[in-house]
Structure formats: C-alpha cells, structure tokens
Image (cartoon, grey):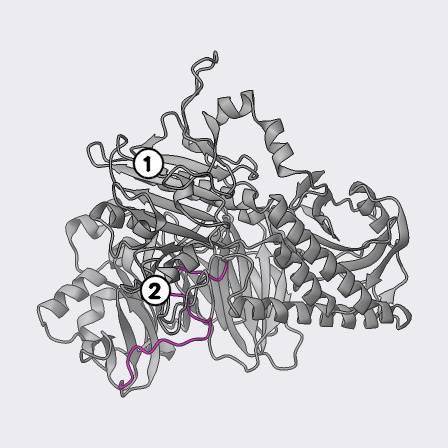
Amino acid sequence: MHLSLTVPLCYSSASEDLGCRRGDFSRKHYGSVELLISSDADGAIQRAGRFRVENGSSDETLDYTPGTWRRTDVHLENPEYHTRWFFKYFLGKVHQNYVGTDAEKNPFYLSVVLSDQNNQRVPQYRAILWRKTGTLKISLPYSPTKTLSVKSILSAMNMDRFEKGPREILNPEIQKDLLVLEEQEGSVNFKFGVLYAKDGQLTDDEMFSNETGSENFDKFLSLLGDTITLQGWAGYRGGLDTKNDTTGIKSIYTVYQGHELMFHVSTMLPYSKENKQQVERKRHIGNDIVTIVFQEGDDASSSFKPSMIRSHFTHIFALVRYNSQNDSYRLKIFSEESVPLFGPPLPSPPVFTDHQEFRDFLLVKLINGEKATLETPTFAQKRQRTLDMLIRSLYQDLMPDLHKNMLNRRSFSDVLPESPKSARKKEEARQAEFVRIGQALKLKTIVRGDAPTSLVTTGLCRKEPWESQLFCSTFPYDIVCADSWGQSVLVATDAAGVMLLDGESLPPVHVFDRTMVVKQMHVLEPQDLLITRTDKGKDARLYVFRLSTIKKGLEERQLIRGKCDSRENKLEKTKGCHLYSINTHHGSELRIVAAIRNKLLLITRKHPRFSAVATGADSPVEEFQYIREICLCDPPVVMSLVDGPTGENDNMICVAYKHQFDLINESTGDAYRLHHAEANRVNFVAAIDVYEDGEAGLLLCYNYICYYKKVCPFNGSTPMIQSNTSDFHFSWNQMPNAIGRLPRQQFSGPHPAHCC
C-alpha cells in the first residue's frame, strides 16, 4: 500500500517544527544555520522577521566530515507528477465520487478510480479524500477475487466513524467542483524575482534603480531560461502583462520537470527616471515568495542582507555571486525563520564550477523553498480556511439533491470496475455522459491554459491544437501530399509535379516534373531519404531517393528530373502498390510495408556499412532488401507499422479493411482482431502509432470517431489486446479527411505526440 500526503492532516507550528529539526541534523545536512535579525542600513532593528542563513559551511567543532556532494542529491520535494491526481487520473474517466460527514459533522468527499499503476498494465485503485484539513491520496492494489468497498478505502485512510455515511454522487457536474478543490493544492507553476545588485549597493532603492545589468548578469539569465517576448505570450505569465507591454517587453521563462517558471527580472521590468523607488519593479519582485539576488563583487566586498529589501512577502532570498577567475557560482540561502527546512542541502563549500549542475541545483532549491513556504502558518491557515469554505459550500449545494436521487444510497457498495458491462443500459448511458462531461472539462482547462501540469507547454511557441500557421498563401496548385524538409515543405501536385516551398518570400523550386505523379511521400532527413509512391494502378511503384543528391542537383541548377530520369530509383517488386507505410518510431532499421492489392511486401534497409552508401551511389535502391510477403483476405485501406519492445518477432502491422482494424504479426503473418467498427458505412481515416515509455499504442480513426488502444507486447505468439484502463475514445464535430502527427517536441506529459 502506498500513501501520498499532499497537505498535512495535522497542522503544527512551523516555528516549533523548525526548533525540533535544528541541532545535529541541520548542522550536518545544512551546514551552518544561523538566525539573522533584520536591521536597516544604520543598524536599527526593523520589525521584519528573522532570517535563517544557509551557506554550506560545517561546524568545525563537530566530529563530522561532510560527504561529497552528488548530483543525485538534487530532487524536487512533492514533485509535479505527485500532484493533481484528479485532473490526471480521474477527470474524463469512469470513476466514483462520494459525500459524507465525519464524526465532527465536517463534510468530506471521496473519489475512487481504477487505473493502471504507472502505465505498467497492473490495475490499481487510486483514491482521494477531500477534507478541510487537506487532501489525502492513497493507492491500493486491485484483486479480481476480492472486491474493494468504500468503507475499506476510508478505513485505510483512518476514517472509521461517520456522522453520515458516504453516498455516491451521480451528478456529472460534481467533476467541476472537485477540480476547483484540487486547485487549492497550490500552483504547479512558479514566479521568482531576480534582482541585480552592483558591488557596494546596500539599499533596495539602489538595486531596483539599475537600468541594465552586466555581461555576467546576462550570462546568468541565459543560464536560468529563455528570453521570451511578452506580447502574445501564451504560456504561464506569472502576473506579467502579455497584451500591452506595461510590465516590460521581454522576460525570462523556462520549464523544469513539469513546472513552468517565469522570472521577474528587475532590469527587464519598466524603469522610471522620475520614480526613485521604482514602484513598478517592486510591485512584482516584492510580491514574489522567492527572490534571487545576483550581486556583483568578490567575497571581500559588502554582502547582501535580507534587511536591505523592504518586503513583508518575500520569505526566501538566494544570493548568487559569479567568480570570473575560475568561472564558478557561489550560492547562499536566506530563509524566513518560520519556513521549514528544505533541500537540497548546499555543498561545502557552496561553489559550483559546472554551470548546468548549478542551474539544476538552484531551480530545485527555489521550487522546494516556495513549496516549504506554503506550509508556514501564514499560508497554511489561509489555504485551510479557503478549502473549508469551498467544501461546506459544495455540501450545501448538494443537500437538495439528497431527495432527488442524485445522491445514490448505495453508500458502502462495492467500487464499480471501469467496465460497465454488467450495468443496466441506464447506468451505461449515465457513465457515458459522465465521461463526456469530464473530457470536455479537461479539454477546456487545457485550451484555457489552466492545465494543472505543463502537459500543454511544448516549448517557447505554444499554439492551440487547431491553430493554423500560414506558410504560403499564393500557391496556385492543389496539393496531393506533402512533407517538411528542414524549414521548407516538399509538396506534390498532379498539375505541376513536385516542388519545394520556402515560404512567401521565395518562389517554388521544381524538383520533379509532372511526369512524376506522386501520391504519397516521406522525407526522412536523419536517413538522407525521400520515399514516394508514384502513379496509380498497375504502373504504381515505390521510389527512393537520396536527399543529398536532390539537394546537390538543386544547388547546381540541374535540369528538373522526370520519371525517365528516376528509373534507377524504383523498387521493382513494388509494382502495383496502392498504399505503403513506414515505421515512425525509428530504431536500428527502417521498415517499409507496401500493399499490392491484398498482398503485403515487407522491405527493410540494410545497415549502411553493408550497403552502397560507401560507394557513393546516387540511388539507394541497392540498400533495400525484400524480407517476406503476407497475404490478407482483403486489400487494406489504412495501414500503420507498430514497433515491438524488442524488435525480435514482435513487430506488428495494423491494417484496416471491411469494418475492422486487425493486427498482423510481421514474422508469422498471423492476424488478430483489434477493433470492430460498429457502423453501417465505415470511412477509414488513419491508424497512428503512438509510443509512451517504450510501449506502443494505436489511435484508430474512422468516421467521426478516434479510439486509442494500448497494444501490449506479444505473449508468445498472441498479442494482448484486451481492454485497458488507459484506452479512451473521442469524437470529431466533422468527419476529418486526414489526421497527421505533429513533430515530437519537448513535452512533460504522458503523451509523446500531438495529432491534428
């Protein structure tokens, strides 16, 4: 049994907790921990709180030798993937929600779902208990022979006494309210202040009045993240204006382990010559819980103290100094005394010569520091009051439904499994509506940019999934097929052959004339290959070209190639091919399957060292070898290759014909039913292979519907195609003509590719 606690169920004084954790533990693991009393520049005591100093040094009076600092010591506390369970595992899936009151008459809510354990095809129960004191999460094993009850789940959470036993909430709108409750966990995105201080500056007015930074400061900013333009920025904005440039034109932004980070940089915020206090800059940085102070000068010069910054909100300061002599960074941490200790501990000495290791250490320290600050009484009590108010308000809203059958009286019934096969038709319809509302709510949250993780953040330029990007507005021909080639697009037309487009500014460049009637193509830049299916009917064939040869011909302005010039590029055995597919999840070899009526021809590319690459041949035809033929009962309409986990006798081919999708074993030719389309007329659109953590799945698209099915590895000679808790489906408003895969980008979520 695994317990994960997101908010402590019992709140103790953070100061008392800090006192218990001081002593040998803090000295050994956090070096010298001392308290600084805040004072102004003249030495007068201020009313601001006292600060704890962490500088990485050890108490020499102790018989203790600090261990060597290791990169593995750096880890996020309560990392992003431990948060937002309801959004990730419940919302948009069949699950149960219950409401009840405990022995003290305080309302509580329980959510239960049956899901995979870390996508390992091991079913497990996940449960969330919502109470005013916080949220408790628990994972429990699934047993097909022992049914788990709501009572046993609550007992595992140390709840055995109730004023009113829990009843199931059948209203699907409850998902909206529980999503609001989950948002009280705190943000998974963070905004940090970055204040530039010149050598000798001792007041915040001086530091905030620095109009620009130094070369070393700019170097530090580039280490923190990327410089982004605020106007039109679609990612996490951290309170900055992204419409009218009132908070500056540029900022620093990054994504770290699923967390979006926006930095409020003093020299990038608006500067005012008339306002010596630089109120606009202080308005942002002074309201950040954590602030980095980058101070120029060596260790002998005057050092920063928290008393120099007049802010009652900033709880943690990270003092960074750069040493140009040995190209290293030194770090010191100041924490307000009520903040619990947080890791990672600073090394001794706290000097970093590896800049990437310093970046990792600093970002983890900042994120952990803000999370620790949220556990101080000031923040924790406010969060608890808000959570209590929301829970009681929701309970009052649900009271009228007690007598309207919206709250089911099967209070201690068995938790329903995911599959509703044994349920009545009415229950099936209710669950379908429940899932539909949840999926719509999940999509709306992602599109709005309020997803609780950075799943929707795909680098510096994030667009809506359906937002088009204009590449060329004046192209005069109908495009049959196309693929990207570097920053250009290779397009095939029936009227003018194949052309290379470089955008609006340059005219199209002819690559093949109209005698090459290309119907399918793939540009494989890492393999220096262009694959095309040309012509139709009995004359159709696959052609393979070297991209480098085509590029050389374009650069030397050679004559436009035609069908006659490409005879050496034909794969002869593919005559009559009406469809082909390649493996997109490239491993050690490229695989092509060509469909010639109801026959599949498997083709692979030899290893380059055994091929004609070394000879410098213009045509790569000799590099390909024919492996085997597989006969089907009908010609396939849609086809996709699926890589097995080992690549040895477990590769598969997904084919669509008649009313079904089948899986074909590449080695044996055996066919297995994957999905049957329940429709009178079936218009097959696509079968797209998707990979997650090395496991394959298929997005099966026909008519208005897309089904996602995880394809488990072959067990002996039979694939495991049974229902899986990760399977899902969705519908389009209109029937799509085609569905394509967007390029894989840096993506912190469970799905490795987008489709559109």
Kindly identify the amino acid type of the residue bearing the numbered disc 1.
Answer: Ser
Kindly identify the amino acid type of the residue bearing the numbered disc 2.
Answer: Lys
> Which quadrant does the N terminus fall into?
top right
- Name the image quarter holding residue 569: bottom left
The answer to which of 420 and 277 lies nearer the viewer is 277
Magenta span of residues: 455-474
- Where is residue 469? Give x, y as percent: 36, 75
Q: Does 101 sit left or right of 229 as displayed?
A: right
Q: Is residue 685 above or below residue 9?
A: below
**Total marks in image:** 2
Q: Is disc 1 surrounded by few (<14), some (14 to 19) or many (20+) residues within 10 Å?
A: some
- Where is residue 199? Give x, y as percent: 25, 41
What main secondary structure does the magenta stretch of the protein show?
loop
Q: Which mark is residue 303?
A: 1
Q: Does 675 sit left or right of 490 as displayed?
A: right
Quickly name the residue at label 2. Answer: 573
Q: Residue at the location (33% across, 53% down)?
A: 208
- Where is residue 201? Give x, y as percent: 28, 44
Q: Is residue 516 above or below residue 712?
A: below
As helix, strand or loop, the secondary structure at mark 2 comes to helix
Decide which of tag 2 and tag 1 comes sooner along the chain.
1
Q: Is disc 2 surrounded by few (<14), some (14 to 19) or many (20+) residues within 10 Å?
A: some
Nearer to us: label 2 or label 1: 1
- Name the image quarter holding residue 216: top left
As helix, strand or loop, the secondary structure at mark 1 comes to loop
- Quick check: can you spot residue 733? yes
Q: Which mark is residue 75?
A: none
Q: Is residue 246 above or below residue 608?
A: below
Q: Does 727 sit left or right of 257 as displayed?
A: right
- Quick check: can you spot residue 630? no
As measured in the structure, the alpha-carbon distance from the residue carrying label 2 to the one carrying label 1 is: 77 Å
